[in-house]
Image (cartoon, rainbow, N blue to C red):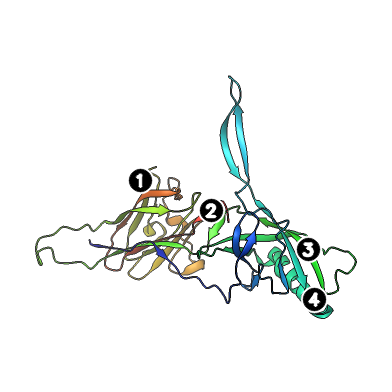
Amino acid sequence: MPVIAAPQVIGPEDPGGETPPPIEVPEVGYATITYIDPTGTRWPMTDLSADWYTLAEGVSGLGAAPYVLTSDPHPRGGARLRHVQPQPRTIVWPLLVKGKDHNVFTANWRALARAFTRTLRDGPGLLEVARPSGSVRRIPVHYQEGWDGRGQTATGITWDSAVLTLWCEDPYWIDAVPVTIHRESGVLVDFLDPYPMVSSGQVLGATTVTNPSDVDVWPTWTITGPATRITFTREDTGESFTLDPSDIGAGLTAGQSVTVSTDPPQVRGPGGDTDNWIGALNWPTAVLWSLPPGDTDVTFQLDGAGPGSAVDLTYYPKYETA
């Protein structure tokens, strides 16, 4: 069966309004930084003409992720590294808030406090670093402490500053734009028209996936029918998983889609969030594998594929630094 192969697709980004010019930030260099609260409201952090902006002196935690190393003593001296465990990241973020009078200052102070502390109730916010080159990296953050003010003479009237501690459960910076690889079955043709030809009704696509990340990423797969059985294989390790809708008494007909998330493991059928297909995986041998940095050969095999059958692999590149 012919295969329509699309290249890696970079999706659009909505910058959400005017972007102030970049300024120099410790551990980052020249960049424009924005905080996005859990409601999606964007708070510019490096616009020196605004009523609030980051105080560059004291910023920390934007570099490489922290790690804990586990080692075993070596009989000839020294030790051997056994395991490397990434740790949550802590970002220290000094912030100045001001206003033309006390009422404006108080409104700004309260609004920013709410924007950060609501991450403890409504889910994480995002700290976004945009480079002059156009690249954008983000990291989910939770407020931990620090919205106290300086408590000194003359502060708290028309200006004050706070030194926030932001806690990041995932220490890696995430690209704002996902990478998507699309493979789709072409239209079936007559074997003898216009000349004898052979095509496969089983294998949808074998391809090389390039991951520009610094670390492994865990992709999401979307499979569009028709298909009776789907197998995904990472060729360098031999790890694979198979989705068989018949195991749960279901099918994947033309136009229907099922989504497989590898982290956390989750399978959602055509009915969406309420349609749990996790039992359709070939447990206990299924391995929902990750993609390492660099090139990886993978194979998407769809039994019962036909016109319209497709696979979309999507992931967000992850990086050590902003």
Residue at the spot of label 3: 162
Residue at the spot of label 4: 105
- Is 39 positioned to the left or the right of 55 in the image? left
Residue type at mark 3: give it.
Ala
Sort mark 3 into few (<14), some (14-19) or many (20+) by Cα contacts within 10 Å: many
Where does residue 88 sit, x and y in percent of width and height? 64, 50
Residue type at mark 2: give it.
Tyr
In three-dimensional space, the C-alpha distance between marks 4 and 3, rounded to whole angstroms, equals: 13 Å
Task: Name the foreground residue: 272 vs 94.
Answer: 94
Counting residues from the N terminus, which is met first, the one under dot 3 or under dot 2?
3
Residue at the spot of label 2: 319
Q: Nearer the viewer, mark 4 or mark 2?
A: 4
Sort mark 1 into few (<14), some (14-19) or many (20+) by Cα contacts within 10 Å: some
Residue type at mark 4: give it.
Phe
In three-dimensional space, the C-alpha distance between marks 1 and 4, rounded to whole angstroms, equals: 59 Å
Q: Taking the image as drawn, is residue 272 in sight?
A: yes
Counting residues from the N terminus, which is met first, the one under dot 2 or under dot 1?
1
In three-dimensional space, the C-alpha distance between marks 2 and 1, rounded to whole angstroms, equals: 24 Å
Counting residues from the N terminus, which is met first, the one under dot 1 or under dot 4?
4
Counting residues from the N terminus, which is met first, the one under dot 4 or under dot 2?
4
Sort mark 4 into few (<14), some (14-19) or many (20+) by Cα contacts within 10 Å: many
Q: Mark 4 and mark 1 in contact (Cβ < 8 Å)?
A: no
- Is 116 positioned to the left or the right of 188 in the image? right
- Is 297 positioned to the left or the right of 190 in the image? right
Element on which disc 3 rests = strand
Residue at the spot of label 1: 235
Residue type at mark 1: give it.
Glu
Vertical position of residue 291 compared to residue 134: above or below: above
Q: Mark 3 and mark 1 in contact (Cβ < 8 Å)?
A: no
Task: Say which residue appears at 40% left-offset and 67% top-offset.
Answer: 257
In three-dimensional space, the C-alpha distance between marks 3 and 2, rounded to whole angstroms, equals: 28 Å
